[in-house]
Amino acid sequence: GRTGVIVDGHFNELRPSNKNADLCPEAYANRLFIFCQASHEIYILAMVYISRLFKLNPELLVPRWDVNRLMFASVIMALKWHKDTCDLFPDKHYAAAGAIAICDLRQIESNFARLIGWHLHVHFEEYQRQQLQTMMAPAPEPAVDCSGCAETDCPMYARRRASPRTLG
């Protein structure tokens, strides 16, 4: 059978991708949003977790190729900690959505939880503060051109097709 989810009455097939680093962050976030069925609230929680990560580990540097793994870890931890068990997909589905191996999923989860000190509970005030910051922040232009991304639902891909650029 095919793997995917139904969104607004339409089946969206989960296309295989072996390398999450090949997708630009915008396409990767969109992929997680669709195939993990993560709500906007889950993304707010994931942002709280990322803020905690850097607050607790100020020396941490995230290489460009690990940005998607960081996003994946925070979204998965938010999903698993804050959604009802009956609403969750099996780990195999999340690994496919994240374009990673199942053993990597478990390693990423444990490393992320350890780095945030297993502090997964989010107080309402902290959630509201992050939600307000997110709503007030202008949408940033990507710092890195994702010219290697071929995802047709990627906003950067659509922009590149509309106005091609050359590297002189």
Image (cartoon, helix red, strand yellow):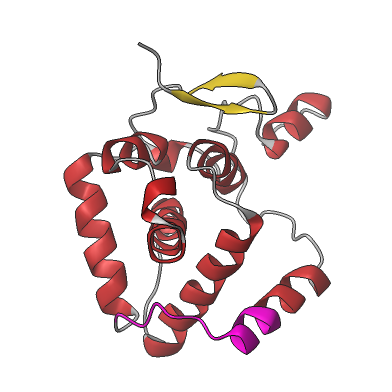
**Viewport quadrant of the C terminus:** top right
Magenta segment range?
A: 118-129
Identified at 62% across, 79% down, the residue is: 127
Q: Which of 99 and 94 is in front in this view?
A: 94
- Residue 109: quadrant of the picture: bottom left
- Residue 8: quadrant of the picture: top right
Q: Please tell me whether residue 17 is drawn above or below residue 78 in the rendered image.
A: above
Asked whether residue 84 appears in the rendered view, the answer is: yes
> In x, y percent, where is residue 112?
31, 69
Left or right of 45 in this view: 136: right
| Residue projecting furthest to the left | 103
Q: Please tell me whether residue 102 is drawn above or below residue 11 in the rendered image.
A: below
> In x, y percent, where is residue 46?
51, 66
Q: Please tell me whether residue 75 is drawn above or below residue 47 in the rendered image.
A: above
Asked whether residue 165 appears in the rendered view, the answer is: no
| Residue projecting furthest to the top | 1
Q: Which of 127 and 88 is in front in this view?
A: 88
Left or right of 39 in this view: 106: left
**Viewport quadrant of the N terminus:** top left
Q: Please tell me whether residue 47 is drawn above or below residue 25 in the rendered image.
A: below
Q: Which of 67 and 125 is in front in this view?
A: 125
Identified at 83% across, 29% down, the residue is: 163
